[in-house]
Amino acid sequence: QVQLVESGGGSVQAGGSLRLSCAAKRDTIATYCMGWFRQAPGKESEGVAAIDTDGSTNYRDSVKGRFTITRDNAKNTVVLQMRSLTTEDTAMYYCAAGAPPYGARLQSRFYNYWGQGTQVTVSS
Protein backbone atom coordinates (compact mmCIF):
# COMPACT_ATOMS: atom_id res chain seq x y z
CA GLN A 1 0.00 0.00 0.00
CA VAL A 2 1.13 3.54 -0.65
CA GLN A 3 2.67 5.58 2.16
CA LEU A 4 2.32 9.37 2.00
CA VAL A 5 4.53 11.99 3.60
CA GLU A 6 3.65 15.68 3.52
CA SER A 7 6.06 18.59 3.82
CA GLY A 8 6.16 22.32 3.26
CA GLY A 9 3.81 23.58 5.91
CA GLY A 10 4.66 26.52 8.12
CA SER A 11 3.65 29.97 9.21
CA VAL A 12 3.02 32.82 6.80
CA GLN A 13 1.34 36.19 6.84
CA ALA A 14 -1.93 36.76 5.07
CA GLY A 15 -1.36 37.30 1.39
CA GLY A 16 1.64 35.02 1.36
CA SER A 17 2.28 31.70 -0.34
CA LEU A 18 3.22 28.18 0.63
CA ARG A 19 4.00 25.08 -1.36
CA LEU A 20 2.98 21.74 0.11
CA SER A 21 4.50 18.53 -1.18
CA CYS A 22 3.35 14.96 -0.78
CA ALA A 23 5.89 12.22 -1.42
CA ALA A 24 4.67 8.68 -1.93
CA LYS A 25 6.54 5.55 -0.92
CA ARG A 26 6.01 1.78 -1.33
CA ASP A 27 3.75 2.23 -4.34
CA THR A 28 3.31 4.47 -7.34
CA ILE A 29 0.74 7.27 -7.30
CA ALA A 30 0.12 6.84 -11.02
CA THR A 31 -2.95 4.67 -10.44
CA TYR A 32 -4.45 6.84 -7.71
CA CYS A 33 -6.51 9.95 -7.58
CA MET A 34 -4.64 12.27 -5.22
CA GLY A 35 -6.24 14.80 -2.92
CA TRP A 36 -5.45 17.44 -0.35
CA PHE A 37 -7.70 17.84 2.65
CA ARG A 38 -7.55 20.14 5.65
CA GLN A 39 -8.95 20.34 9.13
CA ALA A 40 -8.98 23.40 11.33
CA PRO A 41 -9.43 23.18 15.11
CA GLY A 42 -13.08 22.65 15.98
CA LYS A 43 -14.09 22.20 12.36
CA GLU A 44 -14.81 19.24 10.14
CA SER A 45 -12.33 18.02 7.58
CA GLU A 46 -12.85 19.42 4.09
CA GLY A 47 -11.54 18.56 0.69
CA VAL A 48 -9.35 21.28 -0.79
CA ALA A 49 -8.15 19.98 -4.14
CA ALA A 50 -7.90 16.73 -6.04
CA ILE A 51 -6.20 15.53 -9.20
CA ASP A 52 -7.20 12.40 -11.00
CA THR A 53 -5.01 9.96 -12.91
CA ASP A 54 -5.76 11.77 -16.18
CA GLY A 55 -4.71 15.12 -14.74
CA SER A 56 -8.20 16.50 -14.30
CA THR A 57 -8.56 18.66 -11.20
CA ASN A 58 -11.21 19.77 -8.77
CA TYR A 59 -11.10 22.53 -6.14
CA ARG A 60 -13.37 23.68 -3.39
CA ASP A 61 -14.85 27.05 -4.21
CA SER A 62 -12.98 28.99 -1.53
CA VAL A 63 -9.56 28.12 -2.99
CA LYS A 64 -10.30 28.36 -6.70
CA GLY A 65 -7.89 30.76 -8.37
CA ARG A 66 -5.54 30.68 -5.39
CA PHE A 67 -4.50 27.03 -5.05
CA THR A 68 -3.07 24.75 -7.73
CA ILE A 69 -2.65 21.00 -7.45
CA THR A 70 -0.19 19.18 -9.69
CA ARG A 71 1.21 15.69 -9.85
CA ASP A 72 4.48 14.25 -11.08
CA ASN A 73 4.09 10.51 -11.48
CA ALA A 74 7.77 10.07 -12.37
CA LYS A 75 8.79 11.66 -9.07
CA ASN A 76 5.87 10.09 -7.22
CA THR A 77 4.87 13.44 -5.76
CA VAL A 78 1.88 15.73 -5.57
CA VAL A 79 2.18 19.45 -4.93
CA LEU A 80 -0.32 21.96 -3.64
CA GLN A 81 0.76 25.51 -4.47
CA MET A 82 -1.11 27.98 -2.28
CA ARG A 83 -1.21 31.71 -2.97
CA SER A 84 -3.01 34.70 -1.48
CA LEU A 85 -3.41 32.86 1.78
CA THR A 86 -5.91 34.06 4.33
CA THR A 87 -6.40 33.26 8.00
CA GLU A 88 -9.26 31.00 6.91
CA ASP A 89 -6.70 28.70 5.30
CA THR A 90 -5.13 27.92 8.67
CA ALA A 91 -5.43 24.17 9.22
CA MET A 92 -3.65 20.85 9.25
CA TYR A 93 -3.31 19.74 5.64
CA TYR A 94 -3.37 16.09 4.65
CA CYS A 95 -2.46 14.33 1.45
CA ALA A 96 -4.56 11.34 0.43
CA ALA A 97 -4.70 8.68 -2.27
CA GLY A 98 -7.75 6.83 -3.48
CA ALA A 99 -9.91 5.72 -6.34
CA PRO A 100 -13.08 7.79 -6.29
CA PRO A 101 -15.65 7.14 -8.98
CA TYR A 102 -16.35 9.74 -11.63
CA GLY A 103 -13.29 11.93 -11.37
CA ALA A 104 -11.39 13.97 -8.80
CA ARG A 105 -13.76 13.97 -5.87
CA LEU A 106 -13.33 16.01 -2.71
CA GLN A 107 -15.11 13.65 -0.34
CA SER A 108 -12.78 11.95 2.10
CA ARG A 109 -14.68 8.67 2.05
CA PHE A 110 -13.26 7.91 -1.39
CA TYR A 111 -9.65 8.00 -0.19
CA ASN A 112 -7.96 5.03 1.42
CA TYR A 113 -4.45 6.22 2.23
CA TRP A 114 -3.53 9.28 4.23
CA GLY A 115 -0.41 11.10 5.31
CA GLN A 116 0.29 12.40 8.79
CA GLY A 117 -0.37 16.00 7.88
CA THR A 118 1.50 19.29 7.79
CA GLN A 119 0.41 22.42 9.64
CA VAL A 120 -0.33 25.65 7.81
CA THR A 121 -0.77 28.77 9.92
CA VAL A 122 -1.71 32.10 8.35
CA SER A 123 -1.54 35.20 10.52
CA SER A 124 -3.16 38.55 9.86
Image (tube, rainbow, N blue to C red):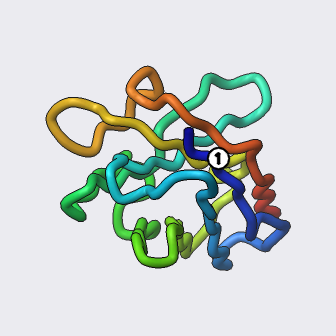
Q: Mark 1 — residue?
A: 3
Residue positioned 47% across, 27% down in the render:
108
Residue positioned 70% across, 58% down in the render:
6
Q: Secondary structure at mark 1?
A: strand
Question: Hey, which quadrant is residue 72 in on the image?
Answer: bottom left
Q: Is residue 61 visible?
A: no
Question: Hey, which quadrant is residue 99 in on the image?
Answer: top left
- Check the image and name the residue furthest to the left: 102
Against 17, is 105 above or below? Answer: above
Against 70, is 60 above or below? Answer: above
Residue 63 or residue 94, whichever sits in front: 94
Is 83 situated left or right of 92 in this image?
A: left
Against 47, is 34 above or below? Answer: below
- Residue 39: percent from left, percent from top: 67, 35
Q: Is residue 85 visible?
A: yes
Is 43 situated left or right of 102 in this image?
A: right
Quadrant containing the C terminus is bottom right
Q: Name the residue type under label 1.
A: Gln
Quadrant containing the N terminus is top right
Residue 91 or residue 9, whichever sits in front: 9
